[in-house]
Amino acid sequence: MNFTSHAYQQYSIDYILDHPTAALFLDCGLGKTVIALTAIFDLTLDSFQIRKVLIIAPLRVARDTWPSEIEKWDHLKGLAYSIAVGTESERKLALRDKVQVYLINRENLPWLIQDSGLPFDFDMVVVDELSSFKSHQAKRFKSLMKVRPKVKRIVGLTGTPSANGLMDLWAEFRLLDLGQRLGRFIGKYRDAYFVPDKRNQQMVFSYKPKPGAEEAIYRQISDITISMKNTDYLKMPELVMNEISVRLSEDEWRHYQTMKDEMVLSLDGKDIDAVNAAALSGKLLQMANGAIYDESGVVAQIHNRKLDALEDIIEAANGKPVLIAYWFKHDLKRILDRFPGEQLDSEDSIRRWNAGKIPVALIHPASAGHGLNLQAGGCTLVWFSLTWSLELYQQTNARLWRQGQKETVVVHHIVAKDTIDENVVVALAKKDTGQAALLRAVNVKLGRVKNEHR
């Protein structure tokens, strides 16, 4: 296929060529992959500035998306690649190929650098979904930092650089520029731009930016960063957000309330921390969905309210494909027990979805949130299970709401009334998610329950 670049794409290609260190914050659908590949072709086969390129991406994106883009475009003919996924022997074989581009999933990065026994002799690195390197304590971050000084050129690609707050940016730019712009130490970055927010005596659970911090941070990184929104550069399909409320019966509500009361009251006398908040939130979200794991891992059924609402949505679709986002394993099982559907977890299932051959498909946001093009298969997405992660939420929606979608995209949210679901929906709408919003949500419940029992 012939590639005719949009003006913003050519600008981005030139930006990579002109900046040995570059961060491209481009929304879904703007063509991050073909932009990066076009620059790589120039650097490896035209100007010969680069010999070997390592592309680090989520597993399915490394295995499927990047290779298909290389094969798709005529102007990339001659750009040879090798996919280093699979067994250890398969990965080593792939990494010994004589090609320009090597693709590896981010989970195998520590293995490549520390355990493979192969030299790290890549002179260019592309990090697809730079936001997955937002934790400076993660193995993948520490591993890549060990070899970062050897790399002549590095490009970070993402559409959601700081979905959970500006604190995420430190590790991402520490990796890109070795600390030149935001500092070499997270503590100094925190002190310079943030103040404590949620805390318990000496323990600080979250931070909030100082006045003017956001603008100051953006000024610091502006010389190596470009940011573009798809709505500014593409004719996007219409997007309709719909909320479908379900109400629990009195008995079902009592079960939910009992779980909430017992878990919260067990924390009486203590400020709730992030670990307890996550546990409490997880239990309440499960119950809002209709089932919960007990202490031995057995699933206890509570209600079918969301399944009934999902049946109405599928029936109203009248044969048009429906994509369902789930979170817990028992959600997946309960949905598949009731409806003839299929999980999108392989190259073949994704191909058949895009061919319109799967009427009801299920995806987990954590495994399918980045890089997959699913817009050819349908235009209806249902959030059966809600997530606190704004990044995963936005990326999952963007699987259907993107360039190439020919119909109006409808995103349904099935929300159990008077449950934690409502807190999540509000947080997503305000783009106020992550640990801080979760803590606020359960702390509100904590205060309410304590008052009720006085």
Image (tube, grey):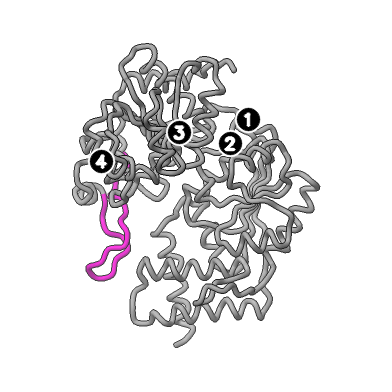
- The stretch drawn in magenta includes residue 206: yes
In the image, is residue 298 above or below residue 68?
below
Going by the numbered disc 1, the residue's amino acid type is: Gly
Query: Looking at the image, can residue 224 be seen?
Result: no
Q: Position of residue 450 (x, y in %)?
A: 44, 81
Question: Could you tell which of marks 3 and 4 lies nearer the N-terminus?
Answer: 3
- State the residue position of label 3: 83
Q: Position of residue 143 (x, y in %)?
A: 28, 44
- State the residue position of label 2: 373
Q: Position of residue 74 (x, y in %)?
A: 54, 16
Query: Looking at the image, can residue 404 be seen?
Result: yes
- State the residue position of label 1: 404
Q: Position of residue 320 (x, y in %)?
A: 76, 44
Going by the numbered disc 4, the residue's amino acid type is: Met
Distance of label 2 from label 4 (alpha carbons): 31 Å
Question: Could you tell which of marks 2 and 4 lies nearer the N-terminus?
Answer: 4
Graded by Cα atoms within 10 Å as few (under 14), some (14 to 19) or many (20 or more), the crowding at tag 4 reads some
Q: Secondary structure at mark 2?
A: loop
- The stretch drawn in magenta includes residue 119: no
Q: Is residue 176 left or right of residue 77?
A: left
Q: What is the residue that sits farthest to the bottom in this orientation?
A: 454
Question: Could you tell which of marks 1 and 4 lies nearer the N-terminus?
Answer: 4
Pick whichever, 293 or 78, lies toward us. 78
Distance of label 3 from label 4 (alpha carbons): 22 Å
Distance of label 1 from label 2 (alpha carbons): 9 Å
Residue at the spot 45% in from the left edge and 19% down from the top edge: 79
Q: Secondary structure at mark 1?
A: loop
Marks 1/2 in contact by CB < 8 Å: the verdict is yes
Q: Quadrant of the N terminus?
A: top right
- State the residue position of label 4: 145
